[in-house]
Image (tube, helix red, strand yellow):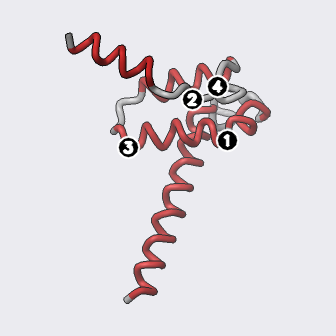
Amino acid sequence: MHCLETITKMNRAEKREVHPLYWHPRIAALRRSVNRLPVGDDYRCRLRHALYQYADQIVTRSHYKSEEGWDDLEALQQVTLGDWMEVSIRRYAEDDRRK
């Protein structure tokens, strides 16, 4: 019965629009790579969010050979960590101002 309830809830849920680049080969490959990473759910969620936030830039960036530059996953991780750090610094500064 539990499965039937879950399917019913999923079918009733609002359908979210798919990102325009969702099925682009580079985005799809990157999404699979992110989903396979052995990391925590919070970090994986941040990576998925950044994937679609920067999808247009990921698609247009150059393909690099091995040892020539960051691959798409490495670039996505660097951008995600940078964004996460900026948010953390901003929160810390706001908390410091309140004291």
Residues at badges 3 and 2 in contact (C-beta under 8 Å)? Answer: no
Cα distance in 3D space between marks 3 and 2: 21 Å
Q: What element carries label 2?
A: loop
| Mark sitting on residue 42 | 3
Q: Mark 1 points at which residue?
A: 54
Q: How crowded is mark 3: few (under 14 residues within 10 Å), some or many (20 or more)?
A: few
Residues at badges 2 and 1 in contact (C-beta under 8 Å)? Answer: no
Cα distance in 3D space between marks 4 and 1: 10 Å
Upstream in sequence: badge 1 or badge 3: 3
Residue at left 62%, top 36%? 52
Above or below residue 47? Residue 2 is above
Residue at left 21%, top 15%? 2
Give the foreground label among 3 and 2.
2
Give the foreground label among 4 and 2.
2
Cα distance in 3D space between marks 4 and 2: 18 Å
Q: Name the residue under label 4.
A: 27
Cα distance in 3D space between marks 4 and 3: 20 Å
Cα distance in 3D space between marks 2 and 1: 19 Å
- Quarter of the rendering containing residue 83: bottom right
